[in-house]
Amino acid sequence: MSKATSNENQAFDADVLVAGYGPSGATMAALLAKRGWRVVVVEQAAAIYDKPRAITADQEVLRIFQELGIADEVAAQAIPHPGTDYLGMDGQIIKRFYPAPPPDPLGWMPNFMFLQPELEAALRRAVERVGQVRTLLAHRVTHVAQDAQGVEARVQRLADEAAFTLKARYLVAADGASSTVRKQMQPIVEDLAFDEWWLIVDAWLRGPLDLPSRAVQYCRPSRPGTYMVGPGALRRWEIKMLPQETPQTFQDHDAVWRVLSEFVDTNGLEHCRTAVYRFHALVVEQWRQGRVFLAGDAAHQMPPFLGQGLCAGVRDAFNLAWKLDAVMRGQAADHLLDSYTDERKRHVRTVVEHAKTFGLIIGELNPEAARERDVRMVQELASGRAETVRQRFIPGLEAGLIARDAAGAPAPGAGALFVQPWVRQGGGAWQRLDDVLGSRWAILLLNGGGDAQEGPAWSDELDARWQALDGCRLRIAAPGTCEEEGLAVVEERDGLLAAWLNGCGAVAAVVRPDRYVYGAARSALELRCMVQALVEQVRAGQGDTRLDPANT
């Protein structure tokens, strides 16, 4: 790095400033620090909130935590999601909503229940282990300004209101639903027309109670509600407030316990937390403004009926972190960062719409409409037309950096979340695929594809361009196959890789650093064209902007 560039680096307090140290912000900080970048986190709270809030997440979250080295720890503290039964007006099952059955294609349990304080503590330990992160607790960002080179944030220390300025190349606002940074940006916010008040009651089991083994949605007009099975002794009830009720109705503990008694014998419970939430369905139109980005609840809010709020924020962090890394290293042009909004907004909007739909099913207050709903849904369930697997409501990518066919639609396999089987190299220990790939682009080649795997279609020039993206290539081969020059060989245990490629009629998959599929190639020529197009998309218009995180 030149002296001039080094002097430029010294003008910044951090490469990336993260506002907010909840799950989204902590994930962002850990991912960037792991890649070698200096991060400053500004968080208003002085410590982790010690009560349960988010309570469920999915396999993609664990896969992201795997990169941070905490997935096994989080999984050990959690329990598998037991599935959810929707009960109609007469207590009959009108809908089943269960995690996908084995095998687990991403290498982790499909859905799990957790305690948020434990999860956040694990994330912060991951941040501390990586280093490179300066955390400012009991501080808040009050104002942001930016120019072509970086961002300047005014920060206030809450203890004495002393203020100072921090400078960074980029700022990620993961500072929650009341985000100060978003308010300053004044983006357009799309309201998806869901606005309801719900009472949340967390309690510890302290005596024998006859409670369902699964989660339950009580779809009864007299009092809609949700029952959730948490880890250990934690149980949660989410109770819809009726039209005549207000948040003030439930300021008194006795009032909370009275409405809770409609669902459970409260004598066997110890109160943990009560909260009144206004469930919204909102998505910000533009998540990027120059060098400032929104993530998590600052960018979107959704009803909790799909259990995807925390998941969406962690996905935001992973999607943006690898792109910031690529741009700061000079592996990608700045326009790659525009794909963050394109990809995540459409994905989140679909999830929010699904969550809203489930919320409307559960919260129907009109008895006649509820009776008609019950008849219709029982028929759909009995006929097999009703979708019962949770994972099928979580979409892949439809926009952004994915391969497209001649009509502009996503090419076969493009935008899907790639499978993660157990693999090994050279007869070594079995590992999850991501632990072999690392946080980089990858081409997975199917053994037995003939000249579709190698040969003149894969030239030295193309290999150099691929390696400039920090890309690797792995061949899925039979046991005992030797590693080839420039091409690692892995043996897989359960046939997931081969099955996925065969299902797309492909012999190779090009996989992004966030494990979404850029595209699946059916031949050597198609693979070459795909990689060439990818390189052009990522690097087009790029100047000499390479940074070395080790020297910043």
Image: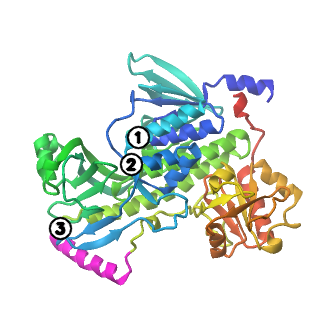
Q: Which residues are magenta?
A: 367-386
Residue 366 circle label: 3
Secondary structure beneath dot 1 equals: helix
Instruction: Find residue 309 and report its horizontal and vertical position in percent.
Output: 41, 51
Instruction: Find residue 88 and report its horizontal and vertical position in percent.
Output: 22, 70
Instruction: For label 3, count other residues whose C-alpha is less than 10 Å away and answer few (under 14), some (14-19) or many (20+).
Output: few
Q: Amino acid at mark 2?
A: Phe
Residue at 77% x, 41% y is: 543
Q: Quadrant of residue 489?
A: bottom right
Residue 114 circle label: 2
User: Circle 1 sits on which residue?
Assistant: 118
Instruction: For label 1, count other residues whose C-alpha is less than 10 Å away and answer few (under 14), some (14-19) or many (20+).
Output: some
Q: Amino acid at mark 1?
A: Glu
Q: Does residue 455 appear left or right of residue 217 in this picture?
A: right
In magenta segment, residue 141: no
Mark before the other along the chain sequence, 2 or 3: 2
Taking the image as drawn, is residue 447 in sight? Answer: yes
